[in-house]
C-alpha cells in the first residue's frame, strides 16, 4: 500500500488500512443483535387466544411440572394461541434471596435449560417475553440476564424486552392495545390504578401474585366516551403452599386465564 501514499509513513499507511477495514461492511457480522424495543405487534385474520405464562418457578420444590406440561400441550394444540411470557419462569433462588437455595430441585442453569425445553413446542406462538423478579436478581448480582438466555434458546429475541412491553394485537379485523409487565399489583385498588394509568389500552397483563384476577375498570376518556380496561393477572404453577402459608399470602391459584380477542374481549378461566 506504500506506493499509493508516498507522503505517509508506514505507521500512517497501516492506520489508513485499519480504518478502512473497520468501516467496511465486509468485515462485520451481518446478523447484528436486535435493538431493545418496547412496542410489539401481532396480527391474525381470525380470533386470538392470549395466554399468560408466568410464575412457573421451574426448579422450586413445589413446581408442578405435570400440570404445566398439560397447559403447554393445550396451547400447542390451540391454532389461535398467542403467548405472553411475564417472568418468574425459573425459581432461581440465590444467596440472600427469599427463596431457599437448599430446597431447589436443580441449579439455576438447569432451570433455564428446562424452561427452554418446555417452551420449545410453543416458541413460535410467543408474542412477548419479559422477566420477573426471580430472573432480575441474577442480573442485579452478576450482570447476566437469564431472560436473554431463555429467549436466545427459544429463538425469540425479537419478542424480548427486559421489563415491559406495549402490545398491539390485530384480531379478526379489530385492533386491541395492551400493556404487559411482571408486576401490575396485587390488591384490586392497585390493579384499578394500573388500568386507569393506561387509558389507551384495552387490557393490561401481569403475574407475580400467584392469583388469577380479572378486574374490569370503566373510565371516561377525554372524548367523553366510556371505555373498559381490564387488569388481568396470571396464575402460578406451584402445588407447595408452604411459602404462601409462611408469608400469610392467599393460596396459590393454578387456574390459567385465557383472553379471547374477537369482536369483543372475554376472559375464560
Image (spheres, helix red, strand yellow):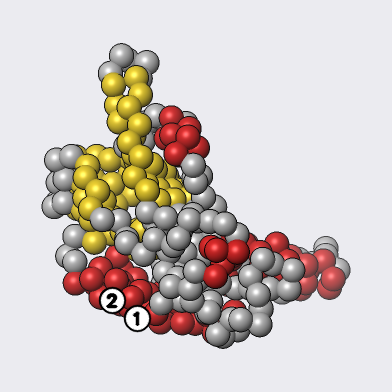
Q: Label 1: few (<14), some or many (≥20) within 10 Å?
A: few
Task: Look at the image and tell me in which quarter the C terminus lies.
Answer: bottom left
Which of the pair 263/44 is nearer the observer?
263
Q: Which residue is mark 2?
A: 70
- Residues at circles 1 and 2 in contact by the CB criterion of under 8 Å: yes
In the rendered structure, the answer to whether residue 33 lies left or right of residue 53 reads right
In the rendered structure, the answer to whether residue 84 lies left or right of residue 109 reads left
Q: Which residue is mark 1?
A: 66
Picture layout, residue 167 above or below residue 121 = above
Which of the pair 20/194 is nearer the observer?
194
Picture layout, residue 181 above or below residue 6 = above
Tell me which residue sits at (19%, 60%) in the image: 80
Picture layout, residue 50 above or below residue 220 = below
Image coordinates for residue 27, horizontal then vertical, percent: 58, 72
Q: Where, by quadrant of the figure, is residue 20 drawn?
A: bottom right
Whether residue 74 is visible, yes or no, is: yes
Which of the pair 2/97 is nearer the observer?
97
Tell me which residue sits at (42%, 55%) in the image: 211
**Which secondary structure lies at badge 2?**
helix
Image coordinates for residue 74, horizontal then vertical, percent: 23, 71
Task: Look at the image and tell me in which quarter the N terminus lies.
Answer: bottom right
Tell me which residue sits at (37%, 54%) in the image: 212
Q: Where, by quadrant of the figure, is residue 97 drawn?
A: bottom right
Which of the pair 244/214 is nearer the observer?
244
**Which secondary structure lies at badge 1?**
helix
Amino acid at each position: 500500500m506504500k506506493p499509493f501514499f508516498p507522503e505517509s509513513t508506514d505507521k500512517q499507511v497501516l492506520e489508513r488500512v485499519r480504518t478502512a477495514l473497520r468501516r467496511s461492511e465486509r468485515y462485520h457480522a451481518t446478523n447484528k443483535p436486535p435493538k431493545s424495543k418496547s412496542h410489539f405487534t401481532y396480527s391474525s385474520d381470525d380470533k386470538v387466544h392470549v395466554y399468560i405464562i408466568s410464575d412457573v418457578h421451574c426448579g422450586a420444590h413445589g413446581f408442578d411440572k405435570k400440570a404445566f406440561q398439560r397447559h403447554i400441550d393445550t396451547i400447542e394444540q390451540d391454532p389461535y394461541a398467542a403467548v405472553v411470557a411475564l417472568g418468574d419462569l425459573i425459581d432461581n433462588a440465590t444467596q440472600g434471596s427469599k427463596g431457599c437455595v437448599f430446597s431447589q430441585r436443580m441449579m439455576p442453569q438447569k432451570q433455564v435449560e428446562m424452561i427452554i425445553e418446555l417452551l420449545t413446542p410453543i416458541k413460535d406462538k410467543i408474542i412477548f417475553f419479559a422477566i420477573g423478579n426471580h430472573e432480575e436478581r441474577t442480573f442485579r448480582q452478576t450482570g447476566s440476564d437469564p431472560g436473554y438466555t431463555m429467549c436466545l434458546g427459544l429463538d425469540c429475541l425479537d419478542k424480548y424486552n427486559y421489563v415491559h412491553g406495549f402490545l398491539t394485537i390485530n384480531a379478526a379485523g379489530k385492533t386491541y392495545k395492551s400493556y404487559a409487565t411482571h408486576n401490575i399489583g396485587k390488591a384490586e385498588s392497585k390493579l384499578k390504578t394500573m388500568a386507569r394509568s393506561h387509558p389507551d389500552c384495552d387490557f393490561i397483563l401481569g403475574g407475580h401474585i400467584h392469583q388469577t384476577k380479572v378486574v374490569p375498570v370503566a373510565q371516561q376518556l377525554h372524548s367523553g366516551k366510556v371505555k373498559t380496561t381490564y387488569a388481568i393477572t396470571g396464575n402460578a404453577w406451584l402445588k407447595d403452599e408452604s411459602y404462601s402459608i409462611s408469608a400469610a399470602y392467599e393460596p396459590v391459584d393454578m387456574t390459567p386465564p385465557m383472553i379471547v380477542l374477537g369482536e369483543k374481549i372475554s376472559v375464560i378461566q
